[in-house]
Amino acid sequence: MENESETRNAARSRGDAAPEEREDPSFSRNSTPRRDSNASSERPSGGRRKLPRRRDAVVKRTRPPVVERREEPPAASNGASSHQESPEPTLRPVPQSDRPKYVRWGMIDLTPEVADALADMNYREPSEIQRLAIPPLLAGRDVVGQAVTGSGKTSAFGIPMAEAVDPRSRRVEGLVLVPTRELAQQVTKEIAAVGSKLGVTVAAVYGGAPINRQIDQLERGVPIVVGTPGRIKDHMARRTLDLGNVRFAVLDEADEMLDIGFADDMEFILRRTPNNRQTALFSATIPGFILKLIRRYLDDPVWVKLVEKFDGIKTAAEVNQVYFDVAERDKQRGVREVLDQMPDNSQTLIFRRMQIGVDRLARDLDRAGYAVRGIHGGMSQRDRDRVMSSFRDGSLRVLIATNVAARGLDISTITHVINYDMPDNVEEYVHRVGRTARMGKQGTAISFVGEHDQEIIEKVLAKVGSGILNHKLLAIYGG
Ligand code: ADP
Ligand code: MG
């Protein structure tokens, strides 16, 4: 299972995005998602009992709908607002006298600690998804958040989660499920930064990393856990993770988790959290089968949909998108031509379908004198971490990856994405392309359309539009 053959059905290649499944011997990547054999032997630890509440926590669905907040009088001139003086119904509980006033971040009221942390992070104002999703989440509502990649979805749930948990809690109150390890690391870092001044700690729980260190951290107690479904289940089975006090659960990139066979794990995990928890689901794409999950696990959610209606997906408008027709055997020459023309400060992420393809291209380009590295689910976590950190700190300018890097990864310096192998479907195209042009920056996405890619490029063109995705000719073909 570690070595993929090149004849492996391309349609299954997306399984690479779930590296932790490799550590799980009961997971068969080529079969339908397995059922949980111990689903019935593990007793739900939550049930319907009342949750311990943070002193000032907002209680789910007992507050007026969030729109009323818009009608509140403007904040005091110093930017702080005291709800004690407000004659309007407020979403926030009246602060205790020992609590400082909330301060405004955009139109959102936050604790001074979180506002301070956001200032340190240089988040001057909320992004659109944050502006629309944070208020209902602070008010205790369930939320479905759908917005293009790079729009700030992590803090859209990270800020309310940091605000909702008791920083001193040694029980897990906030839980975030993500599809990949790298995403677990990234989301952990972001929530920890948001909650740093409140003293909120966050544990990352994912496969491939030493489990003992995770056990130590969980035993010491943390209010928030971010993890991949496989490792979370593992800790639950070891009784090192109890989800009976979770008040806020988030499914990040939920469609991807379902897609790569985590559907049962996700449900297993959610069923072991209290019923009266708050739940949010975030993704750039929400295909039909996610709706079932939403209906089952979210309670009257507020939908925040910032994508076009007709297909539920939209590529970041700032991405300059081109495609070249390139015969399979000419792709290496083609990619060298493209790399040779890159501006000096560019950073490029090249996608390949298979692990072996990543290894080969990395080897060949390395031999040809290009400083490149590869990353895929077949590598050790240490190697993956090493490669990722050199790409993050900019010392590595060209990274070749399987779809393990397609989802959620946020490296704002990426200027170019190359689809050396086309993705298998339009959603994947959108996610890959979304690795560049983060938060309004400029980016370029280049796709190599090979002999067998006619069908997919037509689908992509139909969705994205030929005015946006432009056809060009490589110099090797006289362009
Ligand atoms: P998404 O999950 O929608 O793909 P991310 O949460 O990964 O997007 O955020 C994309 C980038 O935007 C990150 O670098 C993040 O630090 C940055 N970011 C998020 N919110 C803000 C904000 N309010 N102001 C400035 N930068 C932000
Ligand atoms: Mg994300």
Image (tube, rainbow, N blue to C red):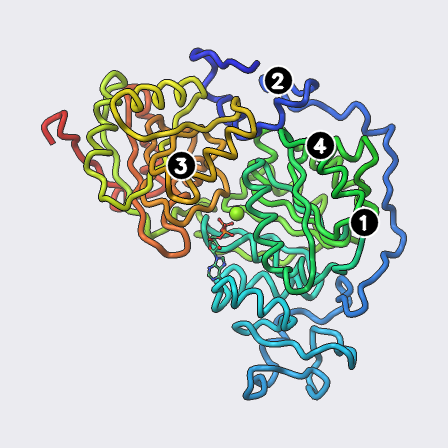
Task: Identify the secondary structure beneath mark 1.
Answer: loop
The spot of residue 273 in percent (x, y) is: 79, 45
Q: Amino acid at mark 1?
A: Asn
Q: Which residue is mark 3?
A: 429
Q: Nearer the viewer, mark 4 or mark 3?
A: 4
Residue 118 lies in what quarter of the image?
A: bottom right
Number of the front mark, 1 or 4 = 4
Q: Residue at x 63, y 82 (%)?
A: 81
Please tell me which of labels 2 and 1 falls first in the chain: 2
Q: What percent of the width, then of the height, locates residue 188?
A: 61, 48
- Say few, some or many: other residues with alpha carbon within 10 Å of mark 1 (under 14 / 14 to 19 / 20 or more): many
Q: Earlier in the sequence, mark 1 or mark 4?
A: 4
Secondary element under disc 4, as helix, strand or loop, is: helix
Q: Is mark 1 within 8 Å of ligand 2?
A: no
Residue that badge 1 annotates: 275
Using the image, tell me which numbered label, if any, was put on residue 31.
Answer: 2
Q: Amino acid at mark 4?
A: Ile
Amino acid type, callout 3: Tyr
Question: How many other residues sit within 10 Å of disc 3, few (<14), some (14-19) or many (≥20)?
Answer: many
Q: Whole-Å distance between the Cαs marked 2 and 1?
A: 31 Å
Inspect this view and state whether residue 479 appears: yes
The residue wearing badge 4 is 211
Residue type at mark 2: give it: Ser
Q: Quadrant of residue 429?
A: top left
Q: Residue 289: percent from the left, percent from the top?
A: 60, 37
Q: CA distance from mark 1 to mark 4?
A: 28 Å
Percent of width and height locating residue 382: 55, 30
**Mark 3 in CB contact with mark 1 (< 8 angstroms):** no
Instruction: Please state, as top left, top right, bottom left or bottom right, where the C terminus lies in the image.
Output: top left
Q: Are marks 3 and 2 in contact (CB under 8 Å)?
A: no
